[in-house]
Image (cartoon, grey):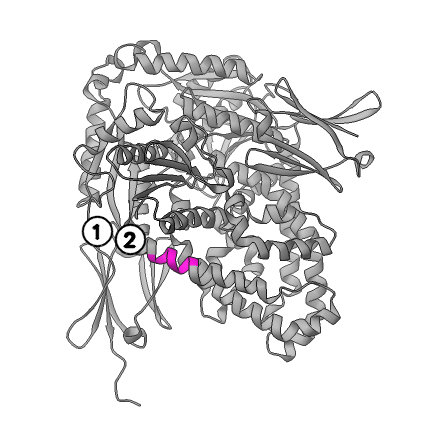
Amino acid sequence: MRVVLLTGKGGVGKTTMSAATAIGAAAHGHRVFLLSTDPAHSVGDALGRPVGARPVEVAPSVVAQEVAVLDEIERSWSEIQDWLRGLLREGADELVAEEILVFPGLEELVALRAIREVEALGEFDVCVVDCAPTGSTLRMLRFPDALAVFMGGVFDLERRAARALKPILETVGLRGLVPGDEVFAAFERLVSDVDDVRQILLDGDRTTARLVTNAARVVVDETRRSFAYLSLYGVATDAVLVNRLLPSAAQGGFFARWAAREHEELAALEAGFGVPLLRAELRAGEPIGVEALAALAREVYGARDPAAILQRGRPLRWRRVGATTRLEIDLPHVSKEEVEVAARGEDLHLRVRDARRAIALPASLVGRSVQSARLERDVLVVTFA
Amino acid sequence: MRLVFYTGKGGVGKTTTAAATAAHAAARGHRTLVVSADPAHSLGDVLGVAVGGEAGRPTEVAPRLAALEVDARATLDPHWGRIRDYLVELFRHQGIEGVVADELALLPGAEEIAALLAVEEAARSRRYDVCVVDCAPTGSTLRLVTLPEVASRALRLLLRVQRAVATVVSPVARVVVPVPLPGPEVFRDVDQLLYERLAKLRELLLGDATSVRIVVTPERMVIDEALRAHTDLALFELGCDAVVMNRLFPPAAAAEAFFEGWSRWQEERLAEVEASFAPLPVLRASLADDEVIGVEALAAHGARTFGDADPAARLCAAPRLRFGRGKGEYRVELPLPHARKDALDVAKVDDALVVRTGNRRRAIPLPRKLAAATLVGAKLDAGTLVVRLAPAASGAR
């Protein structure tokens, strides 16, 4: 199943574009699932009809769903929550347990698990995902790394410790502190879920991200950063969708300067990303309903199939050059000072601005130090000694 | 130090409004700091200069104006130092190297804590008259401003539990499982973070010098979310002092043929907002004729938005939580604008009053005198929740 993720800065029109992409894909003969993972759901508003936590057919060959994130967390975390509540009950303060249980990034992850469920149905060719704004989406991407390490190390340890400590704690009346096996099992399920989601997100043969933007400086700046971050985490971006361009009838008078700025930003966008730049004009009213969205899809995608991979690429790749292996990452609009690279143990540690990632080194490179890391035409090239 | 938070739905122009407020305040003579607490920072983009901050230090961007995009890791490092060291050791023990501790800084609430610590540091430094905070979209803002309350309760409990474990269990545990357990210095750090900093923050947030401004655009969905935010903020006693209506079309824009009709529905939304949020003043920020970027353009935009009003002033004194005494009973009055009776629930749990509106709950600690009282009744009276409590039967002992 093809997966198309749409993300972008708040307010650029992600949801409208997601809905249009879904309806456009259906017009190309695909069976489409439209999934909203943004906790502030608005797919229903774009479609002009209610959409809820249960999948509902919203157009021929298009089924939509808004993931009820809190219910999902409750469903999959109840054992862990019960344990934490028990821990805190000492102070009769259950509210706190609920508050601290929602890790940043967890919400998005739990929501993205729904992709797997859609796939399991086997009834859809493409899943279009209306993601949360960029900040949250990025958090979600780095969360699996942190969690995997955390679980892999600490959790095994905890489980061993828990077994050993249980009898002792029982004698001093602190038995509730030790998580039971059901808690560990719940954690393990979470880890494997996270891993599944990660597999889907990083599979460039079926998953791509599309960045929705407007032709305003501040929005374009954020789009550039998002593009680099997605690359860093290995998610391929296959198009940039520029929404709400002033139509020619509205480019004069009061809006003349806005129009001039748009031209500038569009030129920068075109030069910048190496992926197709698709456009949609501002409409007199928000495009609401299936027909308006189908028209919008035609405007944005033209003759293209919205479900196709519009640009094939692997933003993060290991390449053999002669006898050596090197790492290449597409990082447009990133300057040298914003990147840090170091090999430590089995991992390569990377920092791009405030995003960090540890990438597992191929076995042949473990223990080697970084020989050079340089930016060559928007590509970070790391070679090893 | 005056503290002003800006919140609102994603994309309404929070960052521009916050930066414009700060630039205008600085131009009017206030020593001003503007802080971005949104992990997807765009403050630097709006100011037109990099304000990433070396080691969490604000960057001077104009006379009397400093700006900072909070980096959770850089800010937390000095505070979490020893706690982190302990975790690193614990991980190393398991053969896991450094990066984990860094990643931990990304776990629950770290970004919010970092932003709050930056604000508290600014207050303590006495270097600023005003601090303007550009928050992440609505939900996160609430997490940010309620964090000191939630975190201090959570930490206090965890601390107690941890201490019990460390003193009772650790001597035995060290033999049974060879795992480094936290030493007393780790607890001291948690203590310090907890009692000193969080307590101060809570005081700062609930004080009269702090207020929240909600940014909206003339769109129904945006306004609906703003109304919910207003109720939630009131539940946690965070006073709002203004609503900013952003991107209103000035007459010259409305006169363009393509936008015919836009100003009419914009006026409708504006009237709705004014009615719903009264008595809060609604400031009108007109769409400029170009993207507002750079300190100068921001200051001008701020001047247009605030008119004669001082952007640093408290623009409206919103009523707060009040404990009172009626005949033979106590009264707790909590203003909850836009709250709906059917979505409201009140209970007394131990020495706290638990109030739920929609999907938010708060345990309001009661003064000692009221702690033992029993709940008699509660009603919603013109946007104020009035709870009646009967004193515990005196002399029963």
Q: CA distance from mark 2 to mark 1?
A: 9 Å
Which residue is outermost to the left?
Answer: B327
> Could you say which quadrant of the image residue A290 lies in?
top left
Type of residue at label 1?
Ala
Q: Quadrant of the C terminus of chain B?
A: bottom left
A344 and A24: which is toward the camera: A344
Q: Secondary structure at mark 1?
A: loop
* Crowd around label 2: few <14 · some 14–19 · many ≥20 (10 Å): many
In the image, residue B109 above or below residue A5: below
* Crowd around label 1: few <14 · some 14–19 · many ≥20 (10 Å): some
Residue B31 image offset from top left, x and y in percent: 30, 40
In the image, residue B119 above or below residue A302: below
Left or right of residue A174, residue B269 in this image: left
Question: Which region is colored magenta?
Answer: B197-203
Type of residue at label 2?
Ala
Q: Is residue A143 magenta?
A: no
Left or right of residue A318, residue B113 in this image: left
In the image, residue B67 above or below residue A170: above
Residue A142 image offset from top left, x and y in percent: 59, 40
Q: Which subunit holds the residue at mark 2?
A: B
- Disc 1 marks which residue? B318
Residue A73 image offset from top left, x and y in percent: 52, 51
Left or right of residue B59, residue B128 in this image: left
- Disc 2 marks which residue? B234
Residue A126 visible in this rendered orientation of the protein:
no
Q: Please tell me whether the stretch drawn in magenta is mainly helix, strand or loop.
A: helix
Residue B10 visible in this rendered orientation of the protein:
yes
Q: Is residue B198 magenta?
A: yes
Among the two numbered marks 2 and 1 on one chain, the one whose residue lies closer to the N terminus: 2
Q: Which subunit holds the residue at mark 1?
A: B
